[in-house]
Amino acid sequence: MGMTMTQKNLARHAGRQSVAAGELIEAKLDLVMGNDVTAPPAIDIFQKTGSDSVFDKSRVVLVPDHFTPNKDIKSAQNCKQMRLFAQEHGLENYYEVGSPCHGIEHVILPENGLVVPGDAVIGADSHTCTYGALGLFSTGVGSTDLACAMVTGSTWFRVPEAMRFVLKGSFREGVAGKDLILYIIGRIGVDGALYRSMEFTGPGVASLTMADRFTVCNMVIEAGAKNGIFPVDEATLAYMAEHAPDAVRDGKYTVDLADEDAEYVYTMEIDLSELPYMAAFPHLPDNTRQIGDHEEVRIDQVVIGSCTNGRLEDMRAAAAVLRGRTVAPGVRCLVIPGSNKVWAQSLKEGLLEIFAEAGAIVSAATCGPCLGGHMGILAEGERCVSTTNRNFVGRMGHPGSEVYLTGAPAAAASAVLGRLASPEEL
């Protein structure tokens, strides 16, 4: 029996010719990552192991991003602990406010060329699956597994079963990766891919931008998936040439293509041209509806950003909608570029000026309101349209608040109209 993209990756990192779904393996890792929520407890565990060094100073990455810039004393202490650990162990990749390369972890790792096709990556954050857009295996783990991996450079996996999503056609104007993944989650449910790999293929893949692919892989965890993965193609290699030129020049990447006889437990075919603007209603990402196919939803806040939709393409899409328009009275619109590089390029292109003239507030790169951290917490009864990835009860603040998930164009349109809306309504 042939292997899927994910199975080929795991077999290679386990030093084996092949693996099959359900097998337990130990795999070598190319990169391990923690943030300011998960790294501090991992550091505590690391110190209890008695190890005096990490397995590789270039392959342990720490990114304070959830509560930064520090919102209180506890968050400041967490970041200090990470900072001192990075200094003590000479970590080459520590990203904090003050670095020109800082930002939200799942934006800056690909942006800074730290992950490449064929890698095996873990991060103590559930949305580590984002990097599968580059044709690699990446998944989230807990702080204990992170601590052990910082020592050994390896971890264990149960090889996942695979689901195949065959993409055809191309998006109509304005529709993008967020609409695709919300459509899929709405079809299969929040546990529809439980501990499975979601593998995307078909002729429609070529029409997806890398930003689309990052968004899709970012949210496969919302269907319960172990990982998401796209095949490496010309778009992937063009992205690599820009962000990891040394890896491309030296051939330091691997392309894993699924065998024709690879086994999938489920296959879905999707015509991208038929997808509408989608929204996930409270309080689960699978409570999806076509925007406009619902009663009016008045809102109090809009958030445009996060590891899901905080890339330059998202800033451009939001600015295209907000240009020459203003945010509706009584609505707070928060724009959060995903990295310092995205922020700087948005400045150069005049996007920040468009946001300011529309009445939006532009933040430094941070996870911030996505997880109810800071800079946009909701009060009881308030409603928010957000480009983030989760809309659980109390996710962005008070348990009595509501979050509606959309892509950047719909979020910007909602800010202008003061209600959940699509750009087609402007």
Image (tube, rainbow, N blue to C red):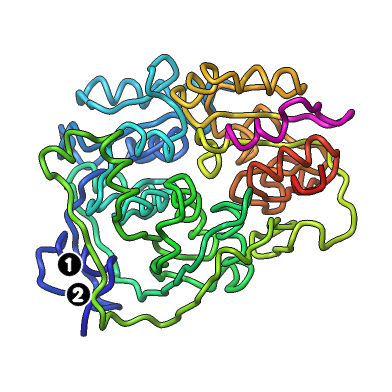
Q: Position of residue 270 (x, y in %)?
A: 53, 71
Give the crowd class for mark 2: few <14, some 14-19, many >=20 residues within 10 Å: many
Q: Position of residue 184 (x, y in %)?
A: 57, 67
The C terminus appears in which quarter of the rendering?
Answer: top right
Residue lying at 39% horizontally and 53% vertically, measured from the top left: 140
**Residue type (three-letter) at the residue carrying disc 1:** Ala
**Residue type (three-letter) at the residue carrying disc 2:** Val
Residue 413 left/right relative to 223: right
Residue lying at 45% horizontally and 18% vertically, measured from the top left: 97
* Label of residue 19 in the image: 2
Give the Cα distance between marks 1 and 2. 5 Å
Mark 1 or 2 closer to N-term? 1
Q: Secondary structure at mark 1?
A: helix
Task: Answer whether labels 1 and 2 touch (C-beta < 8 Å).
Answer: yes
Kindly identify which residue carries mark 1: 11
Examine the rendering and report whether any part of residue 82 can be seen.
Answer: yes
Report if residue 329 lies within the magenta region. yes
Q: Is residue 21 above or below residue 239?
A: below
Residue lying at 41% horizontally and 71% vertically, measured from the top left: 196
Give the crowd class for mark 1: few <14, some 14-19, many >=20 residues within 10 Å: some
Q: Position of residue 236 (x, y in %)?
A: 32, 48
Q: Position of residue 306 (x, y in %)?
A: 56, 38
- Quick one: 244 or 43, which is closer to the camera? 244
Chain part drawn in magenta:
315-333
Quarter occupied by residue 91: top left
Quarter occupied by residue 56: top left
The N terminus appears in which quarter of the rendering?
Answer: bottom left
